[in-house]
Image (cartoon, helix red, strand yellow):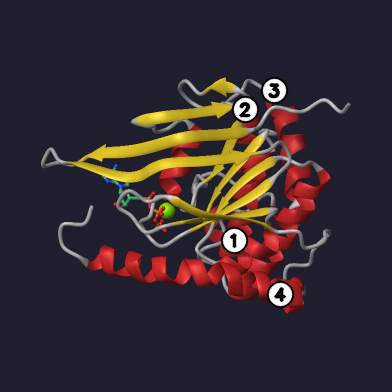
């Protein structure tokens, strides 16, 4: 019998609440159950403000659930999740460091000698297609190039779990597709557990093994979990033309669209957190 590997991420009835400035408690996420297997790529889609980043923050160990548990490789998460690399939505590059220094820093803070860190950083820049851009500062790079550097900065630390919060959000449609294919290529070479947040259902289906849908908040819940059995390797521009892709999209969108409208109304109401 094959050895079963422990589940990379397991949120069990996780409820997340924030205390607001006026003393009220806002329950953002209610009793979320979410499991990501070793080597599995899971996308989370849901309306704005529903709690997607909140779930990533719980998984990263930046937020503690008010109720329920977070387990990482079968151990209760206490403090920061050292197995996770987190690609934030906002640009997280140091503006005063070159591309190669931005990537090398991930190793240098661990005490890797600088010469070794630089050599590995150069390899990672090459892997993300930026081998010739090592000496550029972030302001000399395009938005898509900066995202590549950010990806290299996280991957050089070889995290077992990759948390990505709308990583390609600000990019144009073509660049998103190129980045999506790059991500799949890197992930195929070394299957990490991935938790990928996006508001783009098509992107989620094209990339993931599973798509998880959240309801609008407050007290957002996970309301759907679809297994995406489209064959791999995938080209995320081409897979969108497939009949099976369309069928899945129609089915999931049927559930998501009402929540998107509720989320929009909620986010425009005074008193909403
Ligand atoms: N520190 C905080 N204090 C109070 N409320 C918060 C805090 N952080 C988040 N919230 C609220 O919790 C809810 C979920 O926030 P979260 O950032 O997880 O949403 P999201 O799904 O990532 O949205 P988006 O798609 O817009 O990024 C929102 O209503 C938000 O206003
Ligand atoms: Mg967010």
N-term-proximal mark, 2 vs 1: 2
Q: Which residue is mark 2?
A: 108
N-term-proximal mark, 4 vs 1: 1
Give the foreground label among 4 and 3.
Answer: 4
Q: Residue at x 63, y 40 (%)?
A: 36
Work out which quarter of the rendered image holds the N terminus and state it.
top right
Q: Is residue 64 visible?
A: no
Q: CA distance from mark 4 to mark 3?
A: 45 Å
Query: Do the CB atoms of the residues marked 2 and 1 lie less than 8 Å apart?
Result: no
Whether label 1 lies within 8 Å of ligand 2 gets the answer: no
Query: Do the CB atoms of the residues marked 2 and 3 lie less than 8 Å apart?
Result: no
Element type at mark 3:
loop
Element type at mark 4:
helix
Q: Position of residue 116 (x, y in %)?
A: 75, 28
Q: CA distance from mark 4 to mark 1?
A: 29 Å
Q: Which residue is mark 3?
A: 113
Q: Is residue 146 visible?
A: yes
Quarter of the image holding residue 129?
bottom right
Query: Do the CB atoms of the residues marked 4 and 3 lie less than 8 Å apart?
Result: no
Q: Which residue is mark 4?
A: 240
Q: Which residue is mark 1?
A: 141
Give the foreground label among 4 and 1.
Answer: 4
- Report crowding for label 1: few under 14, some 14 to 19, many 20 or more residues within 10 A (C-alpha): some
Q: Residue at x 54, y 41 (%)?
A: 34
């Amino acid at each position: 019998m094959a050895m079963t590997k422990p589940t990379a991420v397991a949120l069990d009835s996780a409820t997340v609440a924030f205390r607001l400035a006026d003393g009220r408690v806002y329950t953002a996420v209610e009793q979320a159950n979410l499991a990501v297997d070793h080597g599995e790529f899971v996308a989370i889609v849901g309306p704005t403000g529903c709690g997607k980043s909140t779930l990533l923050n719980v998984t990263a160990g930046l937020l503690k659930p008010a109720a329920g548990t977070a387990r990482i490789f079968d151990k209760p998460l206490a403090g920061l999740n050292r197995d996770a690399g987190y690609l934030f939505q906002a640009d997280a590059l140091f503006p005063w460091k070159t591309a190669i220094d931005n990537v090398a820093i991930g190793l240098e803070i661990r005490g890797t000698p600088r010469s070794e860190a630089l050599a590995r950083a150069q390899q990672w820049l090459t892997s993300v297609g930026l081998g010739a851009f090592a000496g550029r500062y972030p302001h000399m790079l395009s938005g898509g190039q900066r995202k590549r550097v950010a990806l290299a900065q996280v991957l050089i630390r070889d995290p077992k779990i990759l948390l990505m919060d709308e990583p390609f959000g600000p990019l144009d449609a073509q660049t998103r597709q190129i980045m999506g294919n790059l991500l799949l290529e890197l992930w195929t070479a070394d299957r990490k557990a991935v938790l990928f947040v996006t508001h783009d259902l098509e992107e989620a289906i094209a990339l993931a093994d599973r798509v998880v849908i959240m309801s609008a908040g407050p007290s957002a819940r996970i309301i759907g979990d679809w297994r995406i059995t489209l064959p791999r390797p995938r080209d995320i521009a081409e897979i969108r033309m497939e009949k099976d892709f369309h069928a899945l999209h129609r089915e999931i969108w049927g559930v998501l669209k009402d929540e998107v409208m509720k989320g929009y109304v909620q986010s425009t109401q005074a008193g909403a957190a």
